[in-house]
């Protein structure tokens, strides 16, 4: 009964997705390119794009934090295990890979696959780059 209540709470929490708002000029990690028309556009590294997706539309931070297990494993733990086992994070996020980090929590993660399956390969690779950036 407790597990069912916990799962229901997790699903309710995961379905509440906060909208992200971009703030221009706040991050010093993003580079800016100036065009001849005088307009500028942010050029995002894969890690920065991955962080934006992870914290925004992916809503991954509701379960995964950099250094501690919340509902799912920490980002550092995910990065370490996938690196050590030569796993493919993108394939897993597409719903086509086996869980190798915390198989007991797979049912919870599986409910988020519609979100990750709707993402482009570029977005999924950016999330992967962001996760691996926690190994540095």
Image (cartoon, rainbow, N blue to C red):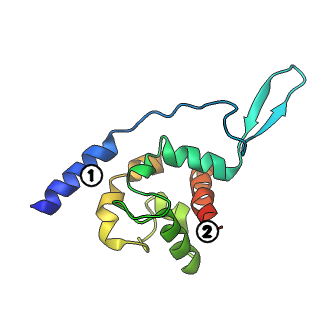
Dot 1 alpha-carbon crowd within 10 angstroms: few under 14, some 14 to 19, many 20 or more: some
User: Which residue does the image show at 66% across and 67% down from the upper left?
Assistant: 136
Residue 10 marker: 1
- The N terminus: image quadrant: bottom left
**Disc 1 and disc 2: Cα gap in Å?**
27 Å
Rendered view: 94 above or below 123: below
Q: Quarter of the image holding residue 44? A: top right
107 or 61, which is in the foreground? 61
Residue 79 x, y percent position in the rendering: 55, 68
Q: Is mark 1 on a helix, strand or loop?
A: helix
42 or 86, which is in the foreground? 42
Residue 78 marker: none
Rendered view: 89 above or below 49: below
Q: Quarter of the image holding residue 86? A: bottom right
As drawn, which residue projects farthest toward the bottom?
84
Q: What element carries label 2?
A: helix
Evaluate whether residue 87 shows in this view: no
Left or right of residue 68, residue 47 in this image: right
User: Which residue does the image show at 73% across and 35% down from the upper left?
Assistant: 42
Camera-side mark, 1 or 2: 2
User: Which residue does the image show at 63% across and 46% down from the upper left?
Assistant: 49
Residue 135 marker: 2
Left or right of residue 89, residue 48 in this image: right
As drawn, which residue projects farthest toward the left?
1
Residue 132 x, y percent position in the rendering: 61, 64
Residue 83 x, y percent position in the rendering: 58, 75
User: Which residue does the image show at 90% across and 23% down from the upper left?
Assistant: 36
């Amino acid at each position: 009964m407790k597990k069912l209540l916990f799962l229901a709470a997790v699903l309710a929490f995961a379905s509440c997705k906060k909208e992200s708002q971009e703030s221009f000029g706040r991050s010093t990690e993003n580079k800016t390119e100036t065009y001849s028309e005088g307009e500028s556009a942010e050029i995002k590294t894969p890690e920065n794009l991955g962080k934006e997706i992870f914290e925004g539309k992916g809503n991954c931070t509701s379960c995964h934090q950099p250094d501690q297990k919340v509902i799912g494993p920490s980002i550092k733990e995910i990065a370490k295990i996938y690196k050590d086992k030569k796993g493919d994070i993108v394939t897993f996020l597409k719903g086509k890979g086996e869980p190798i980090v915390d198989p007991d929590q797979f049912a919870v993660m599986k409910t988020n696959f519609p979100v990750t399956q709707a993402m482009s390969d570029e977005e999924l690779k950016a999330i992967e780059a962001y996760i691996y950036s926690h190994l540095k």
